[in-house]
Image (tube, rainbow, N blue to C red):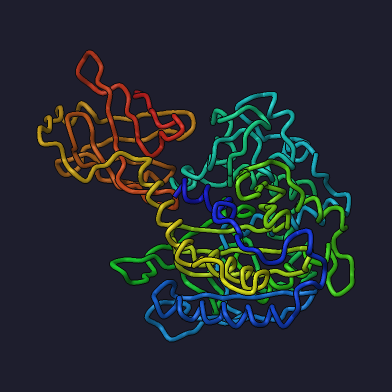
């Protein structure tokens, strides 16, 4: 879901960290005792257990790192609803957009090794990449894509992925996507823009993206269960399947294959591996005392590049770094985090307090929920304040319910058919091929006394249901699907359709198709 996925990236700023506990002006390394942290862990362990019992998620995995030590790793619940296999520290989850800070870590090592620079132009490494504006094509840098300020609209390309287009075709078609803001003037969370930075960096050293990540990060850190290839997740014997709620029951209804946007959302991992990655960030690029990534390079990923939110009444500022949300809270305490979400059944979050060398990662195999944020925010309350400031789990789940509804509200309400419904034209008047640059050709065809819409390279077929005169509806599928969408035909003077507007493809004004011979 487009709106929900956008909001996940800034979610913790909207929740905020309240309380009168440890403040930035008091904070120093070692200020928080291990005893306080262990007490907090015991409380979030109970929170996780209670969440599973209350049907809040089918499975959860949590790991905590403090002062370069993995002090907690534990699983809760099951890998698949209705089956006995339990989640443990080795269980592999898809991590969705938590892949982004993982990706910027790979690039940080390349920057430290002088293989690329944050300010390299995309076309220096991928000369075939083209944006809508020739000036932006010439000037857009790795940094711009990694902090979502290229001008691409939020989630540009995601609908093409849902339609079944390949990675290369999606990236090619971004040249037909008009910007939503001037270059570097707006923040818009964009999976395929972010992914292009990773792919361009891989081309700089003539490697595939996954091979590059294995060489630069996964192998040196011993992250043997981590991959950017869906096939590796799918063949893992100990893996958590994705779940959505159907009539109140967690169900493995969907498979999410995210290879096209691998650097932005395609990673899979377990808490055992991700704990080592947190250690690396909290130790300024060192692992077990060895400088794996230059400190300046990894610090740049934590440096604000674009302000994304400001709540002066509560003294909070949110920004996006290079693959990280960077927040100033509690009078200036800096926290780093990134959430991940597939509406088809995945939730995740990593959250760090660098000055305390403290981090937590939560993975869950059910969506949409606020479970990871509910746990992480509760953990930081217990650690920093000694007590819970509010019911974060309830608040986080309510926030996600609200965001899910806002996603649906982008589309018209088709729950109540019009009482004075107009009859359609002869169905032949609508049939034919329609085209636009971004989404290519769609077909409207007669079938079994009705109409179908066929779209994408495989011509995926959707049944059209008549709504009113020249308006029909259909049920989109895929990660961005938010419910029933309209298909509206414009009729020419000869009584035949000349154009068609597909509502869910038209949220950025790109869903109008002209009839072609």
Residue 282 lies, in percent from the top left, at 78, 66
**Measured along the vertical axis of the image, is residue 315 above or below residue 217?**
above
**In this rendering, position of residue 463 left or right of residue 166:** left
Quarter of the C terminus within the rendering: top left
**In this rendering, position of residue 354 left or right of residue 88:** right
The residue positioned farthest toward the top in the image shown: 493
**Measured along the vertical axis of the image, is residue 135 above or below residue 222?**
above
Residue 271 lies, in percent from the top left, at 63, 74
Residue in view at x 88 percent, y 54 percent: 113
**Measured along the vertical axis of the image, is residue 170 above or below residue 217?**
above
Residue in view at x 16 percent, y 41 percent: 417
**In this rendering, position of residue 209 left or right of residue 27:** left
Residue 436 in view of the camera: yes
Which quadrant of the structure image shows residue 446?
A: top left
The one nearer the camera, 468 or 198, is 468
Residue 302 lies, in percent from the top left, at 75, 53
Residue in view at x 27 percent, y 27 percent: 489
Which quadrant of the structure image shows residue 109?
A: bottom right
The one nearer the camera, 352 or 246, is 352
**Measured along the vertical axis of the image, is residue 380 above or below residue 106?**
below
Residue 233 in view of the camera: no
Residue 154 lies, in percent from the top left, at 54, 40
Residue in view at x 12 percent, y 30 percent: 422
The one nearer the camera, 328 or 502, is 328
Picture mark count: 0
């Amino acid at each position: 879901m487009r709106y929900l996925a956008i909001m996940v990236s800034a979610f913790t700023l909207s929740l905020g960290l309240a309380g009168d506990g440890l403040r930035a002006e008091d904070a120093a390394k070692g200020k928080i005792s291990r005893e306080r942290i262990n007490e907090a862990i015991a409380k979030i362990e109970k929170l996780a257990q209670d969440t599973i019992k209350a049907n809040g998620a089918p499975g959860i995995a949590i790991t905590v790192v403090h002062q370069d030590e993995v002090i907690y790793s534990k699983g809760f619940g099951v890998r698949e609803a209705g089956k006995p296999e339990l989640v443990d520290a080795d269980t592999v989850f898809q991590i969705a957009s938590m892949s982004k800070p993982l990706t910027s870590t790979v690039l940080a090592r390349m920057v430290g090794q002088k293989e690329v620079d944050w300010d390299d132009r995309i076309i220096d490494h991928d000369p075939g990449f083209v944006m809508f504006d020739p000036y932006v094509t010439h000037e857009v840098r790795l940094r711009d894509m990694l902090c979502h300020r290229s001008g691409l609209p939020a989630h540009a390309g995601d609908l093409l992925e849902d339609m079944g287009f390949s990675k290369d075709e999606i990236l090619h078609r971004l040249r037909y996507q008009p910007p939503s803001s001037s270059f570097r003037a707006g923040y818009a969370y964009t999976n395929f823009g972010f992914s292009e930075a990773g792919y361009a960096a891989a081309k700089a050293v003539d490697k595939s993206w996954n091979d590059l990540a294995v060489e630069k990060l996964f192998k040196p850190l011993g992250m043997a269960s981590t991959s950017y290839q869906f096939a590796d997740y799918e063949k893992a014997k100990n893996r958590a399947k994705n779940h959505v709620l159907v009539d109140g029951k967690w169900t493995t209804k969907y498979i999410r294959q995210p290879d096209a946007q691998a650097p932005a959302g395609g990673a899979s991992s377990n808490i055992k591996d991700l704990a080592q990655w947190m250690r690396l960030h909290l130790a300024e690029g060192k692992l077990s005392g060895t400088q794996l990534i230059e400190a300046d390079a990894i610090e740049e990923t934590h440096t604000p590049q674009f302000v994304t939110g400001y709540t002066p009444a509560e003294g909070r500022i949110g920004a996006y770094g290079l693959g990280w949300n960077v927040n100033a809270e509690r009078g200036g305490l800096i926290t780093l985090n990134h959430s991940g979400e597939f509406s088809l059944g995945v939730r995740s979050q990593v959250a760090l307090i660098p000055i305390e060398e403290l981090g937590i990662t939560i993975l869950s195999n059910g969506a949409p929920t606020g479970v990871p944020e509910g746990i992480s925010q509760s953990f930081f309350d217990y650690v920093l304040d000694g007590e819970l400031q509010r019911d974060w789990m309830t608040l986080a789940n309510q926030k996600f319910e609200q965001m899910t509804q806002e996603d649906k509200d982008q589309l018209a309400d088709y729950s109540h058919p019009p009482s004075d419904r107009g009859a359609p034209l002869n169905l032949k008047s609508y049939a034919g091929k329609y085209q636009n640059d971004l989404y290519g050709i769609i077909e409207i065809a007669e079938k079994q006394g009705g109409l179908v819409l066929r779209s994408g390279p495989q011509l995926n077929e959707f049944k059209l249901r008549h709504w009113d005169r020249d308006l029909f509806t259909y049920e989109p599928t895929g990660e961005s699907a938010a419910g029933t969408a309209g298909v509206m035909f414009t009729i020419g003077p000869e009584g035949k359709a000349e154009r068609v507007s597909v509502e869910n493809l038209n949220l950025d004004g790109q869903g109008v198709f002209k009839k072609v011979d």
